[in-house]
Image (tube, helix red, strand yellow):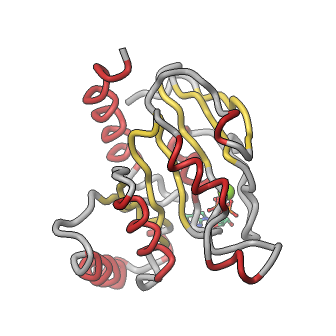
Amino acid sequence: MKIKSAEFVMSNSNVTNAPKDRIPEYAFIGRSNVGKSSLINMLMERKNLAKTSGKPGKTQLINHFKINDEWFLVDLPGYGYAKVSKKKRTIFQYFIENYFKEREQLVCTFVLIDSRHDPQKIDLEFMQFLGENNLPFCIVFTKSDKLAPTKLDKQIASYKKKLLEFWESEPTNFLTSSSTSIGRDELLNFIDQVNKDVADDFK
Ligand code: GTP
Ligand code: MG
């Protein structure tokens, strides 16, 4: 897919105020600092479309971007991090849960996982939550540039093995790096295909 336009539309803390356009929507979520905003910038080939930071907790709101005037891309706050209280740190914020439960246009969620990390409870639970709500998702392994190739292969293979304890088949997954742009074409082609597959539902 060629990116002809990518514009920021709005930020919200309440899904009811999100843009009303009936176009397919894709959400990017994962632990804080996993590289959600960086991945969005890499996909769009724009340096500062989504705000990034070395400190966790940069993205605080639901951010809608309109791509090619055809689909929405949504940058979400990370789960597993909150300045507010320890209790909130273990669950993702209520407004994010509402977003997933109520956003009808949402056709696929990309759950980002740092390639270097072993499976973490919070990510597995989040995928479980999506499954329980019948929300399709893919896994995006991020920061693949940070590991040597053999170590990377091993890490991803063991992650996939863990997934098969919970899922009958391996969820669709992508290996990416915002530094090298690895995975960009695969991810955009996937979105392109889903857009075609759901076109009838959005007429
Ligand atoms: P929050 O909005 O705080 O939840 O974080 P986020 O998931 O949006 O992460 P963000 O894109 O802000 O990136 C966090 C840090 O990781 C930044 O310092 C990025 O430069 C770095 N980073 C993100 N992706 C990559 C990558 O693919 N490779 C490398 N080497 N660094 C990355
Ligand atoms: Mg962010």
Q: Where is residue 8 in the image (x, y as percent from the top left)?
A: 69, 32
Q: In which quarter of the image is ligand 2?
A: bottom right
Q: What residue lies at 59% left-to-right and 51% top-to-bottom? A: 98
Q: How many marks?
A: 0
Q: Identify the residue at image location x=17%, y=69%.
A: 168
Q: Horizontally, is 60 left or right of 126 in the view?
A: right
Residue found at x 36% / y 78% = 152
Quarter of the image where the C terminus is located = top left
Q: Which residue lies furthest to the right in this view?
A: 84
Q: Quadrant of residue 147?
A: bottom left
Check the picture and name the quadrant holding the N terminus: top left
Which residue is nearer to you in this view: 6 or 91? 91
Residue 117 percent location from the top left of the image: 47, 82
Is 38 rendered above or below residue 164?
above
Query: Which residue is farthest top?
Result: 203
Which residue is more in the foreground, 27 or 153? 27
At x 28%, y 26%, the residue is: 196
The x and y percentages for residue 146 are 50, 75
Is residue 63 found left or right of 100 in the rendered image? right
Which quarter of the figure has residue 31?
A: bottom right
Rendering coords of residue 123 (x, y %) = 47, 73
